[in-house]
Image (cartoon, helix red, strand yellow):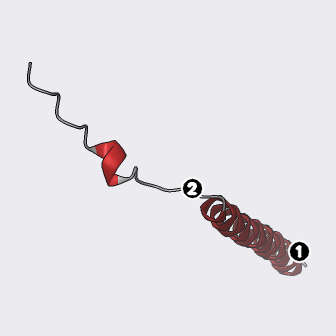
Amino acid sequence: MIIRKLFVLSLAIAGGAAAAYAIGRHTRQLEKQQHKEELRTWEDEGGNLAPSEAAAVPSPAPAA
């Protein structure tokens, strides 16, 4: 009888762990998909990770 209770308890724990893993995995996939969409939107709006070369290199000061 005790062995059966332990078996049922271990099945319940394993089921709970599997459910928690599935929920966490779904959440991570959803966040990753939303991040890709936001990045694509940002790039379509003209977002750029690096400044243009003209803005990155200051022009030399005129000699006085």
Q: Position of residue 62 (x, y in %)?
A: 15, 27
Which residue lies at the image location 83% right of the left edge and 76% below the top edge? 15
Q: Please, which residue is most extreme toward the front here?
A: 64
Which quadrant of the rendered structure holds the C terminus? top left
Pick the front one: 5 or 43: 43
Q: Which residue is mark 2?
A: 47
Dot label at residue 56? none
Give the amino acid type for the residue marked by disc 2 in the picture.
Gly
Seen in the picture, residue 59 relative to 29 is either above or below; the reply is above
Q: Quadrant of residue 37?
A: bottom right
Pick the front one: 26 or 18: 26
Q: Position of residue 63 (x, y in %)?
A: 8, 25
Q: Position of residue 22 (x, y in %)?
A: 77, 74
Give the amino acid type for the residue marked by disc 1 in the picture.
Lys
Question: Which is in the foreground here, disc 1 or disc 2?
Answer: 2
Taking the image as shown, residue 31 lies to the left or right of residue 56, namely right
Seen in the picture, residue 54 relative to 9 is either above or below; the reply is above
Q: Quadrant of residue 5?
A: bottom right
Counting other residues with Cα less than 10 Å from the Cα at mark 1, is it few (<14), some (14-19), or many (20 or more)? few
- Mark sitting earlier along the chain (1/2): 1
Q: Which residue is mark 1?
A: 5
Counting other residues with Cα less than 10 Å from the Cα at mark 2, is it few (<14), some (14-19), or many (20 or more)? few
Q: Position of residue 44 (x, y in %)?
A: 65, 65
Which residue lies at the image location 50% right of the left edge and 56% below the top edge? 48
Q: Quadrant of residue 60?
A: top left
- Find the distance from the CA under tag 1 to the CA under tag 2: 59 Å
Helix, strand or loop status at disc 1: helix
Which residue lies at the image location 83% right of the left edge and 78% below the top edge? 11
